[in-house]
Amino acid sequence: MHSLQRTLRTTGGLFPPAWAVAREATADDVIEDFEIRKGTIVFLPMYELHRNPEFWHNPLSFDPSHFTPENVKNRPKFAYLPFDAGPRICIGQQFALIEMQLILASLLKRFTFVPDDTHNPKMFPLITLKPMNGIKIGVK
């Protein structure tokens, strides 16, 4: 297993920066027999959505196979929302994806990342999700 994958696995999985959002219903609706009236504020917890065993075969761990073309095709479109969706999608989505790939590619060429298996990050959910006690990894 690649050291970065192992590091991500030991941190417990996916931690979306926007761990939840709230939206106002623009019309009356029903979700699983629950009536939602126009104007109601609906809380959407992406943190939980990204760990839903209905959509993820290994929901509590980072697993790169979740993002193979076949798995993406067989999953509902909105089961993974790291940047939200629709008219409120993050304006920096494309930049963030390209930046992440460039930075990771350059770092992985030069360094090996080793997880600190004794460290268990505690999450601090404000507007964004942050680790309260940091994320510790060794760099060689």
Image (spheres, helix red, strand yellow):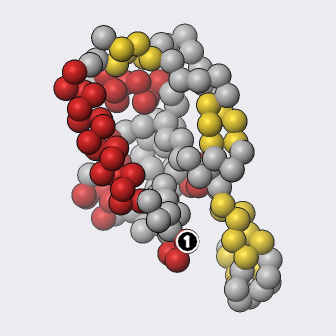
Q: Choose between 5 and 127: the one closer to the eye.
A: 127
Frontmost residue, 140 versus 6: 140
* Side (left or right) of 80 relative to 124: left
Residue 135 falls left or right of residue 125: left
Q: Residue placed at 62% from the left, 37% from the top?
A: 130
What is the secondary structure assignment of the residue under circle 1? Answer: helix
Q: Give the labeled residue for mark 1.
A: 88
Query: Quick one: quadrant of the C terminus?
Result: top left
Q: Nearer the viewer, residue 2 or 136?
A: 136
Look at the image and tell me whether residue 4 can be seen: yes
List x then y, in percent, for residue 1.
27, 24
Residue placed furthest toward the left: 109
Left or right: residue 91 compared with residue 35 = left
Q: Residue at x 34, y 29 (%)?
A: 5
For residue 70, above or below residue 39: above
What residue is rendered at 69% in x and 36% in y? 124
Q: Residue furthest bottom?
A: 27
The quarter holding residue 31 reads bottom right
Q: Amino acid at mark 1?
A: Arg
Residue 30 percent coordinates (x, y): 70, 81
Q: Residue 72's image quarter? A: bottom left
Residue 8 position by quadrant: top left
- Residue 2 coordinates in the image, percent (x, y): 27, 25
- Residue 25, x across and y down, in percent: 72, 80
Q: Residues within 10 Å of mark 1 (few under 14, many from 20)?
A: few
Please tell me which residue lies in front, 26 or 138: 138
Q: How many marks?
A: 1
In this view of the protein, can residue 79 be seen by the observer? no
Whether residue 5 is situated above or below residue 68 in the rendered picture: above
Q: Going 30% across and 64% down the picture, which residue do you hit? A: 73
